[in-house]
Amino acid sequence: MSRIQKIKRLQAQGWSVSAIATELQIDRKTVRKYLQQTDFSASAPTAADRPSKLDPYKSTIDAWLAEDAHQWYKQRHTAQRVYDRLREEVPGFAVSYPTVRRYVRQRRRTAPTTGTLELVWQPGEAAQVDFGQADVLEHDERMRLHFLCVSFPYSNAGYLQLFRGETAECVVQGLVDILHYIGGAPRRLVFDNASGVGRRVGETVRVTELFQRFSAHYGFEITFCNPAAGHEKGNGENQVGFIRRNLLVPVPQVTDLVGSDRDLLRRSEAHWQRRHYKKQRPVADLFAEERAVFRALPPQAFAPYRYTRVRTDRPRRFPPRDPPAGSPPAYPAYSVPTRFATPPQRRSRKRARPSGHTAPRHRTIAPTRDFFLG
């Protein structure tokens, strides 16, 4: 740039093109080029498009990488595998591995990706429901339990309840406990896929009868996320990790799961004085806005029971689980009306048994509560 500045300065002093060329010892064409140039802004750097030994094989590599988009992510081409295939399948292939690796990396960096939009939630619009796992010490024995996490994306508030499984009965029991604790219900529940509350067949989700009754009882809509689409309910995914790190570390000692769950409902609110990461207001204040617009609860809580008839074998055992559960002595080889639900002890090992029930050596049905009628 110093030479161009000198040319411009000499021109401003009235020097001719020939005089400038003589003074600076450069060609007159160079002087004229810079005198005619009006824009000296910096240009964006561009990579030189030089021919490569890999050029004849790039279409083959592109086809393999495009096909990978339809394969399981654990069975896609690595740069090493691309290089090995070219050596095996292309006669006379003589390109180094680093050249192949650079091209594969470049193609993957420029491959089109599916974009997402940020979800915007209104107060009381929805709650996101998901399950996580955590270890607890139950009677000094380490157990891995499931915890139901219910988060409210507008305020970033969340609650949890501990269970031994992820059945529809567990989901409904946990939601009933949380809804009646907060005194209202959101307009919609968002679930991760259909685990626990239904079965996904292709694009259709078949919701269990128990959950259909539960939804009708409280009057909210149900939305299921697509498979492998955690971004559709990122608040719930993040809340599972936050709760595990802040409420279940160190590993808690549990003797009574019912009492522990009541305590966890209160402890969940202890972290609500933190500010929302985007709204910069306390989570407690935002949740108060949501609670004010929640649907009113019906006069009676929903009973999360599922009724069916189960035939026992001659030793009076229920066959739906392995090992089977025991039945009262009055029902050998009999079709017994049965009620399935979560146990009042939250799956505590010391189970209260119906009157007249002979304690079997094998385990009882889990997760069930008072599953005998009559």
Image (cartoon, rainbow, N blue to C red):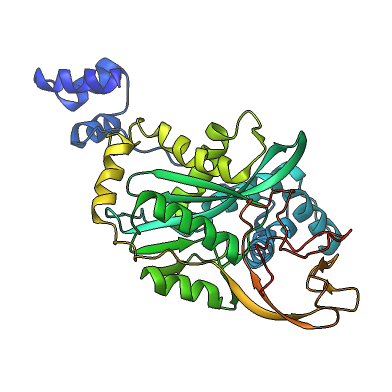
272 sits left or right of 232 in the view: left
Q: In the figure, is residue 371 to the left or right of 21?
A: right
- Give residue 365's position: percent from left, percent from top: 75, 64
Q: Is residue 270 visible?
A: yes
Q: Position of residue 212 (x, y in %)?
A: 48, 75
Residue at 55% of width from left, 41% of height from top?
241
Which residue is at a point 64% across and 64% down the rendered structure image?
59
Quadrant the C terminus occupies: bottom right
Tell me where residue 90 appears, x and y as whole percent.
81, 63
Seen from the viewer's position, the closer of residues 251 and 342 is 342
Compared with 85, 261 (above or below) is above
Between 151 and 181, the one nearer to me in the picture: 181
Position above or below: 113 against 105: below
Answer with the quarter of the image where residue 138 lies.
top right
- Residue at 69% across, 39% down: 135
61 with respect to 183 (left or right): right
Residue 207 at least partly seen: no
